[in-house]
Image (spheres, rainbow, N blue to C red):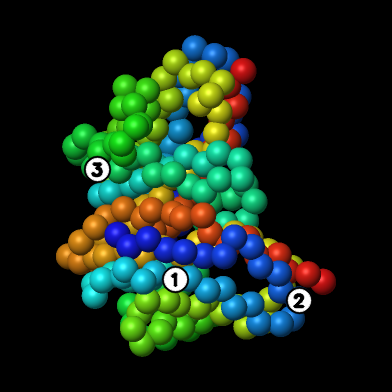
Amino acid sequence: DAKTTQPPSMDCAEGRAANLPCNHSTISGNEYVYWYRQIHSQGPQYIIHGLKNNETNEMASLIITEDRKSSTLILPHATLRDTAVYYCIVRGTTGNQFYFGTGTSLTVIP
Amino acid sequence: GAVVSQHPSRVICKSGTSVKIECRSLDFQATTMFWYRQFPKKSLMLMATSNEGSKATYEQGVEKDKFLINHASLTLSTLTVTSAHPEDSSFYICSARLMDGTGSNSPLHFGNGTRLTVT
């Protein structure tokens, strides 16, 4: 599975959009991009995933570049409860396992 | 939907004893479940893949005799930490994926973890 690179930490003002980038330059054609977040001392929470089209759900939007080498998770109106570590994972449909990188620690500031 | 329940949430045991952690998929069947371990301020590390009705597959460096995995049904996998030592103290997290056909891209769903402290 392709490796991902994320900035170690980011801040965002409450009420503003949080844009979390992820680089996956070695992604292959059948690999999906998944985003999870983990609030302290809890299990990871699934947010969204996509292959090449942009995706949106009630939690967030996922923007994948045309060459699929990078993506951005957008939390449109960040709240204090969005403070967490966000993980970007790339995984193909033939592989079973999800391997976590180091993630981005997002702090939403009042 | 896709709820994964893990029990217990917290356990303290004495060195040398064994501890069993249960992972259940509450509203779906999971032929495969996954066990992770997480140390403070670190990312999740995949330990093993639990396969219903067959042996678990362990990641490199994970001792299979130390971390016994049993996946006896489509909704239950257990992880037993045998002869626990203080260095086994960690946050253990299980996960499962709804299998909706070959080549599924459905996401993993995680339990809320078990905090193990070995004294």
Q: Residues within 10 Å of mark 1 (few under 14, many from 20)?
A: some
The residues tagged by marks 2 and 3 sit, at their Cα atoms, a distance apart of 43 Å
Q: Residues within 10 Å of mark 3 (few under 14, many from 20)?
A: many
Name the residue located 53 percent from the left edge and 59 percent from the top edge. Answer: A103
Labels 3 and 1 touching (C-beta < 8 A): no
The part of the image, by quadrant, that contains residue A48 is: bottom left
**Picture layout, residue A24 above or below residue B86:** below
Q: Residues within 10 Å of mark 2 (few under 14, many from 20)?
A: some
Please state, as top left, top right, bottom left or bottom right, where the C terminus of chain A lies in the image: bottom right
Q: Position of residue A9 (x, y in %)?
A: 64, 63
Secondary structure under badge 3? Answer: strand
Dot 3: chain letter: B
Looking at the image, tell me whether mark 2 or mark 1 is earlier in sequence order: 2
The foreground one among A33 and B75 is A33
**Residue on which disc 2 sits:** A14
Residue A37 visible in image: no
**Picture layout, residue B48 above or below residue A80:** above
Q: Position of residue A15 (x, y in %)?
A: 74, 81
The residues tagged by marks 2 and 1 sit, at their Cα atoms, a distance apart of 25 Å
**Residue on which disc 1 sits:** A23
Name the residue located 35 percent from the left edge and 79 percent from the top edge. Answer: A68
Q: Position of residue A85 (x, y in %)?
A: 59, 59
**Residue on which disc 3 sits:** B51
The foreground one among A12 and A24 is A24
The part of the image, by quadrant, that contains residue A28 is: bottom left
Residue A12 visible in image: yes
The part of the image, by quadrant, that contains residue A39 is: bottom right
Secondary structure under badge 1? Answer: strand
Amino acid marked by disc 1: Asn
Please state, as top left, top right, bottom left or bottom right, where the N terminus of chain A lies in the image: bottom left
Secondary structure under badge 2? Answer: loop
Q: Are marks 2 and 3 on the same chain?
A: no
